[in-house]
Amino acid sequence: MKFKSFTKWDVYIDSLFDYLDRVRGAANTQLSYATRDESEVNSADMSKKYDTLDEFYIRCVRHDGTTDNGRVWSEIKTSCFSIPA
């Protein structure tokens, strides 16, 4: 996964999210949880019925600490490093 062109942004971002869905972070949760819009977990999310445990984790794992956040940014930086300024 390499970001090669701004004209292919949509392809890159889809690849990035697909990758983050496959890679596990510090708490053995898919790294995609770190990219969700809401950083806080509310009681409705906690009590909702999810089809899989992974879906529950992505929606309900708290955003505390920087381990997984740093890893996501590292993946983005690595994939963009070869882009000329």
Image (cartoon, helix red, strand yellow):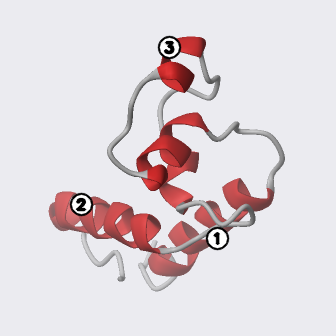
- CA neighbours of label 1 inside 10 A, class few (<14), some (14 to 19), many (20+): few
Percent of width and height locating residue 29: 60, 60
Q: Which residue is mark 2?
A: 9
Q: Residue at x 25, y 71 (%)?
A: 5
Q: Residue at x 60, y 63 (%)?
A: 72
Q: Which residue is mark 1?
A: 74
Q: Residue at x 53, y 62 (%)?
A: 30
Q: Quadrant for residue 42, please give it.
A: top right
Q: Is residue 23 left or right of residue 29?
A: left
Q: Is residue 35 visible?
A: no
- CA neighbours of label 2 inside 10 A, class few (<14), some (14 to 19), many (20+): few
In whole angstroms, how far apart are the C-alphas of marks 3 and 2? Answer: 33 Å
Which sits in the foreground, 16 or 32? 32
Percent of width and height locating residue 58: 50, 46
Q: Amino acid at mark 3?
A: Ala
Mark with earlier residue (2, 1): 2
Q: Residue at x 19, y 57 (%)?
A: 10
Percent of width and height locating residue 66: 80, 52
Task: Identify whether 69 is placed above or below 48.
Answer: below
Determine whether the residue tagged by mark 3 lies in a helix, strand or loop. helix
Q: Which residue is mark 3?
A: 44
Task: Identify whether 76 is placed above or below 50.
Answer: below
